[in-house]
Image (tube, rainbow, N blue to C red):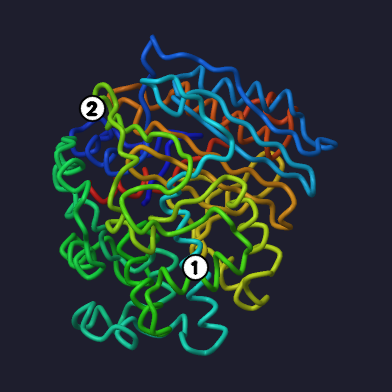
Amino acid sequence: MPLPIPALLRRPGRHRAGWRSAGAAVALALALTATAAPPASAATPAPASHNLVTKNLDRKGLDRSLAAVHSAGMYGVYAAVRDGEDEWRGAAGLADVDTGRPVRSQLEHRIGSITKTFTAVGILQQVARDRIALDAPVARYLPGVVPGDLGRQITVRMLLNHTSGIGDYIPGAFPSLRRLDPQSLDDNRFRHFSPLELVRYGLAEPRTGAPGAVFSYSNTNYVLAGLILTKVTGQDAEKYLTRHVIRAAGLRHTYFPRSPYIKGPHAKMYEALYGRIDPPRDYSVYDMSWAWALGSLVSTTADLNQFYRALLTGELLAPAELREMQTTVPVPGIPGRYYGLGLYTQDMPCGRFWGHDGGVFGAGTYALTSPDGRRQVSLGINLMKYQRPDADPSRPHPIDAALNTHIIQALCGKAAAGAGTAGALLSPMETASLAAAVRH
């Protein structure tokens, strides 16, 4: 899910005096993304990179800035950067802190809420076929699932741009997170959730606003979107997205897992839960039904770059549907952030980029692409919720600062990365949103 991923960021909610409260800390936990410092005894492999073509990319500089993320405390980090046909891939740190196995640039990785972009594409493909209307009520497609007037007031568009006002289901599915206790994470490792069960948890949460009134990130919205896609196509959303989005984009290492296990080579995925799990625990083996059509995909950084390039250059959607996807609403509290239908904008020193972030227990992902699909970065990390809720919220965690520097360098070049980036810090979507879910 949202997971909001921690990383390049200005601490979400830093402007709120109550951020240090127990409730806010819990909210952080729900964000599904953060980190913790690696053990002092962990080996530190040399950064690895693969420079396919480097006419426009600073290979050595990218190697250094990626290594700095590991040096700042991240267990393992891997990234892929593209500028036109020029590509660099790199990795630094550890895939397994016990054995010292190093990360590699093409490891498979749980990408969390980046899955939402795939689901939104699937919905918009059906919009193009006149089988779904963005401004039609949810009740037209899922009668009785969202009860009463609410089902007639909330539209498909409101689900996709998070203005429905429906609460997030994460606190109901993982109740111990409200008190920063990992018990729910362990209890649910092999539990199978049905989509309707997740919807019921979300509907039981307090409303975050009137339908269409304000942006409020909620994973429940995309459970409902997945159910609509299933209803309209007559096939499970995962099956539809595999055939019509994943394969259509030519992705070779992106898939919905059929078991709690990742099929290909991957890093262990460590969850620190803001210091409540010490040492951080590996959650790479997990039943991802809790994230279904909104956060369960496995992918690689190279595949994510290929996906977003295909999307933004019109290979997956016609111009009319792509314009709908890029019609945005403001995201409160995150400067330069506007949310469309399953993807958002982020303003950087060198311009505006499109993409999404994602976070699950133990894994975080970022993906950003220029509007023309030329300049891209995708990055994965394998240690989450490393920040401490009682830290000074005006000071970024060293990992966050290093991630920010690397991503800005990847997108804007060495000069921009070194010129100061205080105004361009990236805030993970899910961290801020799930914090709000707990505050309510």
In this view, the residue in front, 311 or 301, is 301
Q: Is 141 rendered above or below residue 369?
A: below
Q: Amino acid at mark 2?
A: Ile
Where does the image place residue 269, in percent across and percent down from the top left? 37, 35
Q: Which residue does the numbered mark 2 point to in the structure image?
A: 277
71 to the left or right of 230: right
Looking at the image, which residue is at 68% across and 69% down? 315
Looking at the image, which residue is at 71% across and 55% down? 373
Q: Residues within 10 Å of mark 2 (few under 14, many from 20)?
A: some
Looking at the image, which residue is at 35% across and 48% down? 261
Q: CA distance from mark 1 to mark 2?
A: 35 Å
- In the structure shown, which secondary structural element does the residue marked by tag 2 occupy? loop
Where does the image place residue 71, in percent across and percent down from the top left? 51, 17
Q: Residues within 10 Å of mark 1 (few under 14, many from 20)?
A: some
Disc on res. 242: 1
Looking at the image, which residue is at 43% across and 68% down? 160
Q: Are marks 1 and 2 in contact (CB under 8 Å)?
A: no
327 to the left or right of 56: left
Of callouts 1 and 2, the N-terminal one = 1
Q: Amino acid at mark 1?
A: Thr
308 to the left or right of 206: right
